[in-house]
Image: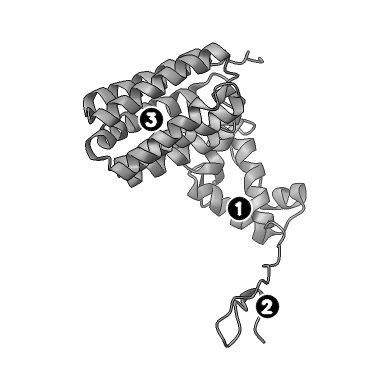
Amino acid sequence: MESTAWAAGDDMGTSAAMPWPKRPRRLATVLVEELVDRLVSGEVPVGAALPTEPVLCETFGVSRTVVREAVKALEAMRLVTVQQGQGTRIRPMADWDLVNPAVLSAAVRHDADNAILEDVVDVRRTLESRMAAQAAAHVSAAELDVIEQRMRDLDASMDDAAAYLKADVAFHDAIMVASRNRLGRAMVHNLTVEAYRSLRYVGDPSTEHIRITHGAHRRILDAVRAGDAELASRAMDEHIIDSWQRRRPAPSPRVD
């Protein structure tokens, strides 16, 4: 019998408005998120063994199958290494797949000294300054129209910090689209989507901060419009680092 979830239409080809059923989150997914958070936080030190399967089963109330699936996910994220006879051991941070959204999200959440956020800013500077140059060299009339519309959205949002942040992200994305660098855009998106969820990354911009940032956006647009790749690259690089320096949070105090 055909499932109603897949019954997209009748014999006449019409589309049925049948919503797909909501399903509960997989237990393994929930367990992975919990374990990633605990490992990234340092609750289990590097080189130490993860609790055994029976202990994890009892602690989280799940089956051995769920635990094994979760451990395989942790191994794929390079958070742990599984060795026969030695158990599952925690790998050093240098080995972690920080581009993985779950790992990056936890790393940002526990980034007491801002080291991960500093890395995010450095990667953004490298990629986005290059893409700004590419946009200046290749932007089409239609792409420039979009960038200019995003600038008008910024103009209209200067009195609303939340709206300005949303317009800011859209402006940067329009530049990246115009660069035609699809991989670079995907990498920046994957890195920043988690960072933008952190108040420690976005900060609490003042009216003066927004005014300065707005001027930087205008200079980027002017350089792209003029087709000046070198100026566009420099303007983007200076904007990203200057903006970060204004909003960079103080490191969290260490608890010994």
Label 1 and label 3: CA atoms lie apart by 30 Å
At mark 3, the secondary structure is helix
Residue 4: mark in rendering:
2
- Circle 3 residue: 123
In the image, is residue 79 above or below residue 212?
Answer: below
Q: Nearer the viewer, mark 2 or mark 1?
A: 2
Return the residue nearer the eye: 176 or 153. Answer: 153
User: Which mark is first along the chain, 3 or 1?
Assistant: 1
The residue shown at (70%, 48%) is 56
Residue 173 picture quarter:
top left
126 with respect to 71 (left or right): left
Q: Secondary structure at mark 1?
A: helix
State how far apart marks 2 and 1 are (Cα): 31 Å
* Badge 3: residue crowd in 10 Å (few <14, some 14–19, many ≥20): some
Q: Residues within 10 Å of mark 2 (few under 14, many from 20)?
A: few
- Residue at the image position 58 percent from the left and 88 percent from the top: 11
At label 2, which amino acid type do we have?
Answer: Thr
Would you place residue 224 above or below residue 6 in this image?
above
Q: Name the quadrant of the N terminus.
A: bottom right
Residue 70 - label: 1
Question: Which quadrant: the C terminus?
Answer: top right
Residue shown at 52%/42% (left/top)? 101
| Residue 17 % position (x, y) | 66, 71
Question: Can you give x and y, in whole percent of width and height, for residue 63 in the image?
Answer: 71, 59
Q: Earlier in the sequence, mark 2 or mark 1?
A: 2
